[in-house]
Image (tube, rainbow, N blue to C red):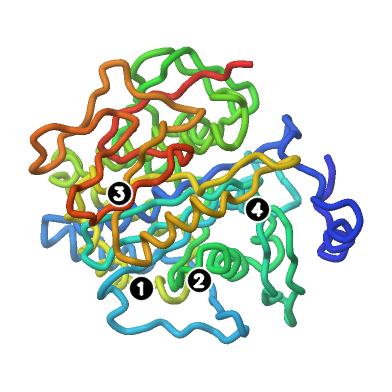
Amino acid sequence: MDEMPTRAQARAQEKSAGPSVARHGRLKRHNPFRTIAALLVSVLAVAGISTAGVAAYAAFDVATSLKPAVKLVDSKGKVVTPGVGAMDGAFNVLLAGSDSGGGNASYGDRGENLNDVTMLLHVSADHKNATVISFPRDMYVAIPSCPDPKGGSYDAMSRQKINNSLSYGGLACTVLTVEKLTGLDIPYAGVIEFDGVIEMSNAVGGVPVCVAGDIYDPYTGLSVKAGDNTLQGPMALAFLRTRHGVGDGSDLGRISNQQVFLSSLVRTIKSADTLANPVKVYGLAKAATSNIALSESLNNPTTIVSMAMALKNIDISKVVFVQYPNHYEGDGVAPTKDAADTLMQALKDGKSVTLTGDTGVGSEAAPSATQAPAAGATQPPAAGSTTAPADGSSVELPSDVHGQTAAQVTCSKPFQD
């Protein structure tokens, strides 16, 4: 197995051979996978607790399960102090998923700590829209100067794959990198641990997903048949990890495949069967907080509950999963600037975004184009697209930007050469 280049070696590569050598193609490595579902689930779950006795016990027990907080810093290296009343208005939460194995020997020892999953949750100031942005792991970006957890700091780098940021300066470096890329302030963040995916899927009794054809991936152990499947435990984890089994075998296909799972998970969590069941709600909150290392700004139940209150009434048709605009370049991808600027400006202006393209290479609309009902909607939009309001409150994204809403029912596409 190739070793990850040191910081100095990476800088030397920039000056000589250009982009660093891709690690994406090593098929036999184990890539433990995490998902932003953990935070989204936890805040929704805490808000949904309906029985006073369960709520009181859950609040105490969940609080005691929080992991040691991670310090975030600003661009000058100054520690960010948690603010008061930060849930007023818009807010951003970054979730990084490390491929280190989380200390569980059964997942293998990678000897590296890369953020193979990087997602940003943006909630609008009026708390009517939530946008979840997935950043491709092989996307070339600028990494700013980051603090070294052992002391001192790392130099800025002009062009490295975004999944290197966690190894250079921990969660704080990933946050700084995404802030530089997007222009958004990100005061809340967490690193998701491996077993959380299994525990979350178990807590809701499994997540139903549609598969357009049989999928088999020997590298993750995934084996599902065409049609509807309810996934939990190790199989849910394998589904989220797979890329060789879906789409074109790339990380971009894996992102759209994840969105099939995440959109279904949101629908499952928001269903009466989950929110009316205190045992499921408590299990969700416990699974999330037990498997996320949170930033200091997010490491208290009060903040999580404040987020939950902002999220719990958002209609699932207003929860948009979007792949950060990109295009293939060399052995990876690069940001598509115009489309990315359109997306980020819409969020900064407090507007929702409307998807006009398809769901991505790893998924497709369900055969019946089924939509989960949106509150107050007279006619649901077609699967694979959304409809922009006529009042100009939403910004249409270019057709080459991929994603879906949580209301859209989609199916994973098997790998095709």
Residues at circles 3 and 1 in contact by the CB criterion of under 8 Å: no
| Mark 3 neighbour density, 10 Å: few (under 14) some (14–19) many (20 or more) | some
Measure the C-alpha gap from mark 2 to mark 1. 11 Å
Residue pointed to by mark 4: 163
Residue at 23% across / 43% down in the picture? 317
Measure the C-alpha gap from mark 4 to mark 2. 23 Å
Measure the C-alpha gap from mark 4 to mark 1. 27 Å
The mark that comes first in sequence, 4 or 3, is 4
Circle number at residue 300: 1
Measure the C-alpha gap from mark 2 to mark 3. 21 Å
Q: Quadrant of residue 358?
A: top left
Residue pointed to by mark 2: 68
Tell me the element at label 1: loop
Residue at 74% across / 40% down in the picture? 331
Tell me the element at label 4: helix
Tag in front: 3 or 1: 1
Tell me the element at label 2: loop
